[in-house]
Image: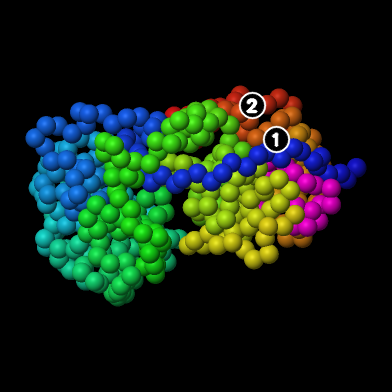
């Protein structure tokens, strides 16, 4: 019997949008709980410079382990709350001050990928896993032809966020876009609206220009300023006594558990898009699962997908689009360099896929290189052909009576319930299984808890 029906369910209440917290990561295994703890009065050794003064930073970059470094004069601070250290204690063979820094992104060339570049005067140093790379320091004119000596700031730009893997250098009022695999390798721009950048950094696909202690977010392709006004780094990027804006959140245990990835609170949706970005959704925020070397952090949905708020019941990708199901409605965004809302959405599930009786789902997923969309409600699996946008075949029964989410990627099919996940090789294995596989921990397997 051809069913293709899903019983309506109770809609979950929508949480108000949460504040977006930039970098709070202090160490690779950070659980995020330091978002809400009080500053340690011993975090800055006596007699050493204080990161919390008005002086700002000469350069900022993530290292190859995902820990942010802040440079000023001959000193460096690691992470959200690390103590003051001398640069040559962390970066052998180099003394400060430095002019600029960035972590290179070049997956096509493993010998350059994840290397850290530190610029000082006419020279550049390169490090990998804490060691100076053979052949460095080198002249900037040799390592990065066309880039001027003593740049003010530098930041990497990933393919998909820029046209190709690039490095952006700032010098005075001129911006130099460096693409090593193109000729000419350097293109110059003037982003007058952005102003002077004394340091720059990329974090979680967002780009920040620092001018002294203040920063603004900008578009790395156009230079457009995305912040309504400059913000103070001491409230977002570094821990300083008496500062920060998480104090109201710390009083709300529910919000704390939502934003703490290791709380074992269940997720409502998981998805992997066409650009290999993987997301986990919970209570109006999301976590990026594929960017561990950028650290872990919750973001409100609308920081990535404009006008998307509240609980996401299911999410999936198809043909360079991301789809979100919330209650009885579907919303769609293109997933090129930026997520852009697709005109005509949101739509009712019934209208989008010609499923007249479907008003809610527990989970949904697509698999790579397939036009099959699978909708799950209870223990029923419904197949929709996304090319025809119609139900295909009969509903089938699976052994899981309850699920929170589902995701299919190159590693197989994952079904999520509570703090656990179940892994199958593919849909066929799921449909043929009489006994569920041993459950795994979402927190440890996906979230490094």
In the image, residue 2 sits, relative to residue 99, either above or below, namely above
- Where is mark 1, residue-wise? 430
Element under disc 2: loop
Residue 56 is tagged as none
Left or right: 133 in relation to 74: right
In this orientation, which residue lies closer to the viewer: 249 or 257?
A: 249
Picture residue at 33% right of the left edge, 70% below the top: 193
**Residue 444: image location, x then y, percent:** 48, 29
**Residue 316: image location, x then y, percent:** 62, 49
Picture residue at 49% right of the left edge, 52% below the top: 303
Q: Quadrant of the C terminus?
A: top left
Residue 249 seen in the current view: yes
- Where is mark 2, residue-wise? 437
The residue furthest right is: 1
Residue 296 seen in the current view: no
**Residue 188: image location, x then y, percent:** 28, 74
Rate crowding at label 1 as few (under 14), some (14 to 19) or many (20 or more) other CA atoms within 10 Å.
many
In reply to whether residue 353 is colored magenta, the answer given is yes
**Residue 342: image location, x then y, percent:** 62, 63
Rate crowding at label 2 as few (under 14), some (14 to 19) or many (20 or more) other CA atoms within 10 Å.
few
Q: Quadrant of residue 159?
A: bottom left
Q: Quadrant of the N terminus?
A: top right
Magenta span of residues: 349-372
């Amino acid at each position: 019997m051809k069913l293709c029906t899903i019983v309506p369910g109770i809609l979950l209440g929508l949480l108000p949008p949460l504040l977006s917290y930039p970098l709070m990561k202090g160490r690779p295994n950070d659980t995020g709980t330091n978002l809400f703890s009080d500053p340690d009065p011993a975090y800055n050794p006596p007699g050493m410079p204080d990161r919390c003064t008005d002086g700002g930073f000469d350069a900022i970059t993530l290292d190859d382990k995902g820990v942010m470094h802040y440079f000023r004069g001959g000193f460096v601070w690691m992470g959200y709350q690390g103590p003051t250290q001398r640069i040559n204690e962390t970066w052998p063979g180099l003394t400060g001050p430095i002019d600029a820094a960035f972590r290179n992104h070049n997956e096509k060339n493993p010998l350059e990928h994840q290397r850290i570049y530190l610029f000082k005067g006419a020279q550049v140093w390169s490090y990998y896993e804490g060691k100076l790379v053979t052949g460095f320091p080198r002249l900037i004119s040799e390592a990065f032809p066309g880039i001027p000596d003593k740049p003010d700031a530098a930041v990497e730009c990933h393919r998909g966020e820029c046209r190709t893997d690039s490095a952006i250098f700032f010098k005075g009022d001129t911006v130099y876009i460096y693409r090593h695999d193109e000729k000419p390798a350097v293109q110059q721009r003037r982003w007058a609206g952005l102003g002077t950048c004394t340091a720059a950094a990329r974090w979680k696909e967002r780009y920040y220009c620092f001018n002294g202690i203040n920063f603004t977010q900008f578009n790395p392709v156009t230079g457009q300023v995305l912040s309504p006004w400059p913000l103070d780094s001491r409230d977002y990027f570094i821990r300083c006594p008496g500062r920060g804006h998480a104090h109201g959140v710390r009083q709300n245990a529910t919000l704390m558990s939502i934003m703490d990835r290791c709380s074992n609170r269940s997720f409502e949706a998981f998805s992997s898009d066409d650009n290999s970005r993987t997301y986990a959704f919970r209570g109006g925020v999301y976590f990026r699962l594929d960017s561990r070397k950028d650290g872990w952090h919750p973001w409100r949905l609308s920081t990535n997908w404009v006008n998307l708020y509240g609980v996401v019941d299911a999410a999936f990708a198809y043909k360079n689009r991301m789809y979100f199901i919330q209650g009885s409605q579907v919303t769609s965004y293109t997933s090129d360099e930026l997520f852009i809302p697709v005109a005509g959405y949101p739509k009712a599930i019934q209208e989008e896929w010609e499923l007249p009786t479907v008003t809610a789902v527990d989970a949904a997923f697509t698999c790579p290189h397939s036009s099959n969309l699978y909708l799950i409600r209870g223990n029923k699996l419904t197949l929709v052909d996304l090319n025809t946008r119609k139900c295909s075949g009969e509903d089938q029964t699976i052994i899981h009576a309850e699920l929170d989410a589902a995701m299919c990627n190159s590693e197989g099919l994952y079904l999520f319930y509570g703090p656990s996940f179940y892994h199958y090789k593919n849909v066929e294995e799921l449909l043929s299984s009489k006994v569920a596989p041993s459950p795994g921990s979402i927190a440890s397997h996906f979230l490094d808890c």
